[in-house]
Amino acid sequence: MRRLITILLATIAAIALPFTTQTPVQAAEHDYPMQVKVLRTHWHSQRGYFSGFGRGNLISQQPGKPPMQAMDWTFGCGAPVRITMGPDTYPARYGSNELQVIVNLPEMGTTKTKECTLKVEMHDFVYRIRPGNQLVTQPLAGGPDTPVEENNQ
């Protein structure tokens, strides 16, 4: 009987093992409780160092914080902060204070990731994209959209 139970448990474990969802990247993302949706970004590189600025939304489930809030940022790190397409986002967490958001960026052509610290300015609105790729703001409290002048960041 004991041998039958042991064989049964080993069989269940062998069947269940391929269906587990913990991979090294997913396990690391567990440390990033927020997401960043990048809508605009401008950067340049020099010898593998990337610096620039951008606009997007911080998606947060943090107590006392809006579920989504617009932010502008500057950055300098070893990977570019690229626009996220469709529903894609970057895993994120706060840095040493709430003026820093650390995003986990994928390294192109590999399964590795790099952290990049964004120096952020939070806003009381959300960025949205209208048809024609026009960036607009929508107040957190609701109200009409306001077009963004893109050349004044």
Image (tube, grey):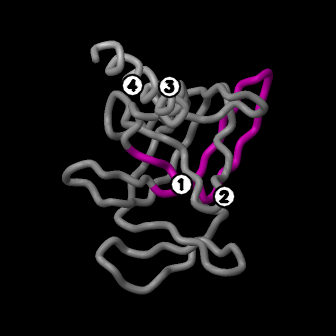
| Residue 38: x %, y % from top left | 58, 53
- Callout 1: SS: strand
Q: Is residue 12 above or below residue 61?
A: above
Q: Disc 3 residue type?
A: Ala
Q: Spatial distance from mark 1 to mark 2, Cα to Cα? A: 9 Å
Q: Is residue 147 magenta?
A: no
Q: Dot 3 surroundings within 10 Å: few (below 14), some, or many (20 or more)?
A: few
Q: Which one is nearer the viewer's eye here, 4 or 25?
A: 4
Q: Residue 37 colored magenta?
A: yes
Quadrant placement of the N terminus: top left
The residue that disc 2 covers is 85
**Residue on which disc 1 sits:** 37
Residue drawn at point x = 37 percent, y = 36 percent: 94
Residue depicted at x 59% and y 54% = 88
Indicate whether 149 appears above or below 91: below
Question: What residue would you read off at disc 4?
Answer: 8
Magenta stretch: give its range.
34-57
Q: Is residue 120 above or below residue 86?
A: above
Instruction: Return the residue at label 3.
Output: 14
